[in-house]
Amino acid sequence: IASELIQAFGRAVSEAEDDAFSAGPGNESPQGVIADLRVQANMVKSGIADKLVDGTHNGLDALIDLMYTPKKTYRRNGTFIVNSQTEAVIRKIKNEQGDYIWEPSVQVGTPAMLLGRPVRNPEGLPDIAANAFPVCFGDFMAGYKIRDRAGLTVTRISEKYIDYDQTGFILKRRVGGQVTLPEAFAVLKIAA
């Protein structure tokens, strides 16, 4: 039972950490990349109110501008992060020839590519909406630091629940994260 609890808890913690490292508010959790005001200063505006795509503008220009906002040093190792809903919108963007710009991965274990750069999906990022930051591009290895203080600890408690013939488990994980080089990132802001 303990090993199954550890696996389930590990999956839940991974998802929560993904969300916190990308969009966390920083109160009792790591501050996410898009929540950092210094990163928000490196913003590219979408050019469309409440959307990334409309009948006259397909959002591709904003994504290209976003990709070229961080310094060249960080652009080389850049990755896009978007949630699944935003990814679905971007996957439908087409170039002038009517071809989708999205490059689905054909190799197992290789991430999908957008404009030649990998895409990851932390679900904690906001959806496309007015004044939201639904897309971020940058070098996460260089610009964001994660500190794992204690790893995962598991404590089995049997004495407390002995009257009920039950066993309890306490699982703890202490981790922090913070933007260290805001110039390694850029965010896309949807117009109001």
Image (tube, grey):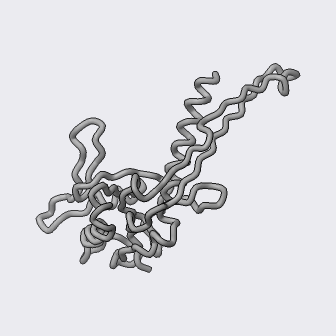
Name of the residue lying farthest toward the top: 165
Q: Where does residue 78 sit, x and y in percent of width and height?
A: 32, 57
- State the residue at coordinates (60%, 61%): 26
Can you say whether 27 is above or below 170 in the image? below
Q: Is residue 125 left or right of residue 99?
A: right
Quadrant occupied by the C terminus: bottom left
- State the residue at coordinates (55%, 36%): 10
Q: Is residue 186 left or right of residue 148?
A: left
Name of the residue lying farthest toward the left: 97
- State the residue at coordinates (39%, 78%): 49
Can you say whether 103 is above or below 173 in the image? below
Q: Where does residue 182 sit, x and y in percent of width and height?
A: 44, 66
Total label count?
A: 0
Can you say whether 114 is above or below 129 in the image? above
Name of the residue lying farthest toward the right: 163
Q: Where does residue 25 sit, x and y in percent of width and height?
A: 59, 62
- Between 14 and 164, the residue placed more toward the observer is 14
Q: Is residue 99 left or right of residue 176?
A: left
Q: Is residue 142 visible?
A: yes
Looking at the rendering, which quadrant does residue 106 occupy? top left
- Between 110 and 145, the residue placed more toward the observer is 145
Q: Where does residue 76 sit, x and y in percent of width and height?
A: 27, 58
Quadrant occupied by the N terminus: top right
- Between 125 and 116, the residue placed more toward the observer is 116
- State the residue at coordinates (28%, 41%): 110
